[in-house]
Image (cartoon, helix red, strand yellow):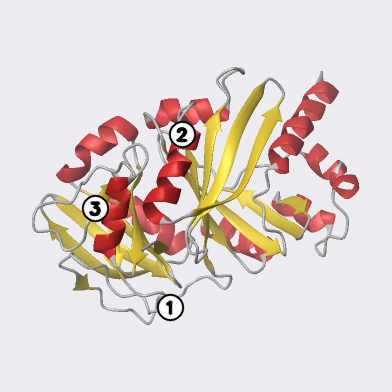
Amino acid sequence: MTAHDVEYIEIYTSDQQNTKDYFSSKFGFAEKATCSADGLDSTLLRQNDIQLVITSGPGVAGFLAAHGDGIADIAFSCEDPAAVREGALAAGARDLTPDRAACPVVSGFGATRHTLVRRAAGQAFELPAGWDWVLTPQSPAHHGPAHELAKLDHIAVCLEAGTLHDTVRYYIDGFGFEEYSSEYVAVGEQAMDSIVVRSLSAGITFTIIEPDATKKPGQIDEFLARNGGAGVQHLAFLVDEIVPAVLEFEARGIEFLQTPGTYYDALVARISGLDEGIAELRKTNVLADRDEWGYLLQLFTRSPYERRTLFFELIQRHGAKGFGSSNIRALYEAVERARESAS
């Protein structure tokens, strides 16, 4: 048996109200329910099929001290959670299931675990099992964004150097994932290796990255240091139209990364046939990339957390099946051109 979808993602935070506001008032998630038990205060947020559980309280103090605000649980939906648990244990997982728990729990990467929830593929999402949820009265005043997050496109994971292939094998053997693609990206004197794994249903996609230890330390090493080890670097949300979505989310208070103008000076030569105008992309700092199937547009937020670890991505796909890796190189070269022209 295999895992087929991301059931929910649980974020541990030191400031639940600010984190809830970030996702609800800025990204447009709706609060569905709350739960308080065993030193944990949790709120369930939902937008389409994306479910986030925001958790704070004394029970998360150890995680926060070691890693800061971040993702503690990526719950998988399964036809048969017990069978998936057995497969994960056979592949080397640690059993983290609490006493009298409603769902099995197994280890993932770093301090991130996987709760295994029973839900058939295609069945509607319900309140996550095993929690004493109290439904939140739905206010007619709540208005989601005009440009919604359609679904969770992928989850980017950073690992310590030398652990990539063992981790990939763990998800293939333990959860029935398949290797989707792989790429080595060199940027100046830095480099990283990445492998994408996904469930057979394509409902779970992990982009797993490790730094090349033979090269100079770079952004992945910085994340690992700030995060206290392996963890989720970002969540990517699929949108139908990224340019108006960025404008709306910026107006709501989301801060996105800025892109140097020299990136767009080279974009026409690098990528042809964009439906969106270069001026639109430049105005919103949106990045573009192409693969053999089409092109994609993407933009990353600034991390809203003190340690600057977890952040988020908007992505629009025009047939492309990749993840924008050449933007890493293109951005690096654009920054270098800007630096040289200023000197």
Residue 304 visible somewhere in the drawing = no
Residue 286 or residue 254, whichever sits in front: 286
The N terminus lies in quadrant: bottom left
Residue 3 or residue 150, whichever sits in front: 3
CA gap, disc 2 and disc 3: 21 Å
Which of disc 3 and disc 2 is earlier in sequence?
3
Secondary structure of the residue carrying tag 3 is strand
Q: Quadrant of residue 244?
A: bottom right
Looking at the rendered structure, the kind of residue marked 2 is Leu
Circle 1 packing at 10 Å, graded few (<14), some (14-19), many (20+), is few
Residue under the point 46% across and 34% down: 159
Which residue has dot 2 on it? 159
CA gap, disc 1 and disc 3: 22 Å
Query: Taking 13 as reference, is 196 left or right?
Result: right
Looking at the rendered structure, the kind of residue marked 1 is Gly
Coordinates of residue 8 in the picture (x, y in percent): 36, 61
Coordinates of residue 34 in the picture (x, y in percent): 22, 65
Which residue has dot 3 on it? 105
Residue under the point 8% across and 58% down: 100
Residue under the point 78% across and 34% down: 334
Query: Taking 249 as reference, is 121 left or right?
Result: left
Q: Is residue 329 above or below residue 77?
A: above
Q: Quadrant of residue 83?
A: bottom left
Which residue has dot 1 on it? 122
Residue positioned most to the bottom: 140
Give me the disc on residue 278. Answer: none
Looking at the rendered structure, the kind of residue marked 3 is Val
